[in-house]
Image: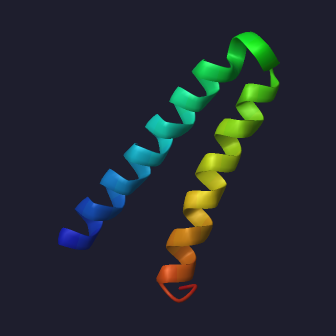
Amino acid sequence: MRTVVTTLLDAAGLLLIAAGAGAALWPWTAGGALGVAGLVVLGGSWLAARQDGGR
């Protein structure tokens, strides 16, 4: 159960970081800010998979 809660908190944190980065960059990059937000989420997912051994 602890791993599930940790995973959910990690996912929520990544989404908040991505949303914040997207909102901060929106005035300067318009739609490009969504790309930055996507990169944050994908980068976090990649790191989590790497730490878990790719399972």
Residue 31 locus on image (x, y percent)? 80, 21
Residue under the point 62% across and 48% down = 40
Above or below — where is 8 with respect to 19? below
Q: Foreground residue, 14 or 3? A: 14
Above or below — where is 27 with respect to 20? above
* Left or right relative to 34: residue 20: left
Residue 35 locus on image (x, y percent)? 76, 37
Residue 33 locus on image (x, y percent)? 73, 27
Asked if one can make out residue 30 in the rendered structure from this viewpoint, the answer is: no
The quadrant of the picture occupied by the N terminus is bottom left
Above or below — where is 16 with respect to 33? below
User: How many discs mark residues in the rendered view?
Assistant: 0
Above or below — where is 50 with respect to 44? below
Q: On the image, which quarter does residue 28 sit in?
A: top right
Residue under the point 53% across and 85% down = 55
Residue 46 locus on image (x, y percent)? 62, 68
* Left or right relative to 34: residue 19: left
Q: On the image, which quarter does residue 24 sit in?
A: top right
Residue under the point 28% across and 66% down = 4
Q: How is the image coloured?
A: rainbow
Asked if one can make out residue 15 in the rendered structure from this viewpoint, the answer is: yes
Residue under the point 54% across and 30% down = 19
Q: Point out the residue furthest to the top here.
A: 27
